[in-house]
Amino acid sequence: RYIPVENFMARLDKLIEKYNVGFLSPATENFGNDKQWLEKFCREIKKRDILWTAGAVRTKSVNPESIAMMKDAGCVSLSYGMETGSPKILEIMEKKTSLENNKNAQKWTVEAGMTTVVQLVLGMPGESPATIGETIEFVKYCFTLTPDLNPNNLSINYAQALPGTPLYEYGRHKNLIGQ
């Protein structure tokens, strides 16, 4: 669910006025999936002349044009929850995206001159030396896109079986998580 752009900007205007905010990092899921919302957001935030970053962007929801639009509106960084470089693990995670989408999003973001970080999740059911090898190859690809990428811009996390997630239900089904 998206906050209407008008409401978002009204709240942002108050923060700018009261605290002289010049940089914004909205905490949201699926940033930019709604193309109409994103276009309106970019038009409105550009008027405020602030810098911003977007996280939790879905790789299948971007293209060079949308990335350029965000950059023109003051966006300096995009982060994607790519999670893995393995098509098999993407399917297990139900990411509903492809390795090609992940590669393209990374490539287009770097080509636009924006920063990004490779975010990974390891330890899903089905993870193996082969899938880890695929992820290593993906990371190598990402870090060869430009010599300007900081090799420390790598976020490696472990799979967490949080209540309400498919991984949690899998753990319960396998009796790995008790009452």
Image: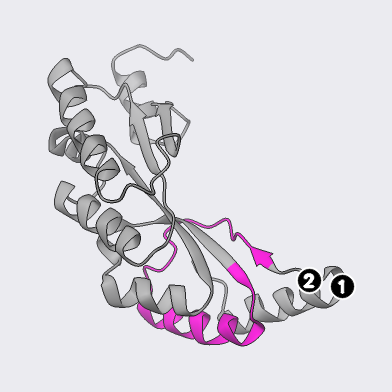
Q: How many marks?
A: 2
Classify mark 1: helix, strand or loop: helix
Q: Which residue type does callout 1 highlight?
A: Lys
- Residue 37 drawn in magenta: yes
Q: Does the magenta stretch include residue 95?
A: no
Label 2: how many Cα within 10 Å (few below 14, some 14–19, many 20+): few
Residue shown at 51%/69% (left/top)?
A: 75
User: Relative to 144, does residue 26 appear above or below in the rendering?
Assistant: below
Residue sticking out furthest to the right: 18
Label 1 environment density (alpha carbons within 10 Å; few <14, some 14–19, many ≥20): few
**Residue 15 location (% of width, % of height):** 78, 71
Q: Give the range drawn in magenta.
A: 23-51
Which one is nearer the viewer's eye here, 100 or 147? 147
Quarter location, residue 34: bottom left
> CA–CA distance between discs 2 and 1?
5 Å
Amino acid tagged 2: Leu
- The image shows residue 103 at horizontal and vertical percentages of 21, 51
Look at the picture and state if 115 lies above or below 138: below
Q: Which residue is drawn at 17% across and 47% down?
A: 99
Residue designated by label 1 = 18
Q: Are marks 2 and 1 in contact (CB under 8 Å)?
A: yes
Residue 145: give x, y in percent of width and height: 25, 50
Q: Name the residue under label 2.
A: 15
Give the residue drawn at x 75%, y 68%: 21
